[in-house]
Image (cartoon, helix red, strand yellow):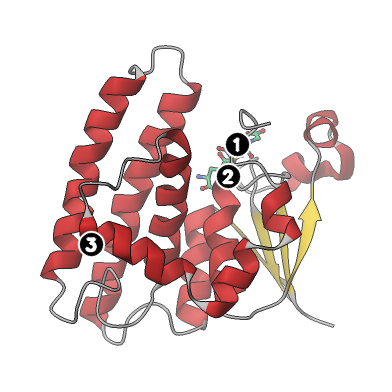
Amino acid sequence: MPGYTLTYFPLRGRAEHIRLLLGDQGLSWKEDEVQMQDWASGKRDLKKNAVFGQLPRFQDGDFVLYQSNAILRYLGRKHGLSGSNEQENAAIDMMNDGVEDLRLKYYRFLFLENAPNKEKYLQELSDQLAAFERILANNSKGPKFLVGDKISYADYNLLDMLHCNLDISPEILSSFPLLSAYVENLVARPKLSEYLKSDGRKKRPITPKHK
Ligand code: GSN
């Protein structure tokens, strides 16, 4: 039977925004978990066959897609989570790029040898979060979502990045009331909350650094 398959390492990493979308939308998918040692040894030729030599890989029936944000946008368009007109669509795309900037800084902080120290990282993060706080404040439809009055694929991405950063410092949202309420509202969504409590979610570390 055709369906969704997500091929990735046993991590949240660059697949978690996809899982948050699927979980919240009540969509079922198969997890095809790749162990690091199997990836490294070339088992199943996964790296060789990957368009850019990396995971995640997403399969929808016979259709195969790589690049985590392309997968997220594909699902967003397919399931009505990408805005109701061209302008909302572009605004959501812009938000998702803004979240990608957060993600790149986060991975740089965790993995690069010459990364900024934690204090500097958190200061820069705070400036970036202030931008998202303003975005919520300026949404003419209210502060529940990044764009308009309906959840979009960019909201799942931002929620994931906020979770990752809350793991580094649980205080990061204390001076951002709208972002704090935004996270509370999202995690209270029944299907999303069910996914967040699932064993699959709980057993997957954020990155290989989070054993
Ligand atoms: O968003 C994306 O899917 C790509 N722009 C990046 C995918 C990526 O970095 N994949 C990593 C694991 S997630 N890490 O941050 C990966 O496949 N690493 C193994 C390798 O051999 O490169």
Mark 2 CB in 8 Å range of ligand 1? yes
Q: Amino acid at mark 3?
A: Leu
Check whether the beta carbons of the residues at disc 2 and disc 1 lie within 8 A of each other.
Answer: yes
- Taking the image in four quarters, ligand 1 sits in the one at top right
The residue shown at (47%, 57%) is 69
Q: In the drawing, what numbered circle is on residue 207?
A: 1
From the image, tell me which residue sits under label 3. Answer: 178
Task: Left or right? Give the position of 26 relative to 174.
Answer: right
Nearer to us in this view, 145 or 92: 145
The location of residue 96, given as percent across then percent down, is 34, 59
- CA gap between label 1 and label 3 equals 27 Å
Q: Is residue 153 visible?
A: no
Q: Disc 3 on helix, strand or loop?
A: helix
Q: Quadrant of residue 27?
A: bottom right
Counting residues from the start of the chain, the first of labels 1 and 3 encountered is 3
Residue 66 in percent (x, y) is at: 60, 55
In the picture of the structure, the residue carrying the numbered disc 2 is 13
Q: Can you tell me whether the CB of the residue at mark 1 lies under 8 Å from the nearest atom of ligand 1?
A: yes
The amino acid type of the residue labelled 1 equals Thr
Q: Tag 2: residue type?
A: Gly
Relative to 18, is 76 on the left or the right? left
Which residue: 39% across, 65% down? 184
Q: Secondary structure at mark 1?
A: loop
- Marked residue nearer the N-terminal end (3 or 2): 2
Task: Report the side of 141 relative to 168 (left or right).
Answer: left
Q: Is residue 36 above or below residue 148?
A: above
For the question of whether residue 192 can be seen, the reply is yes
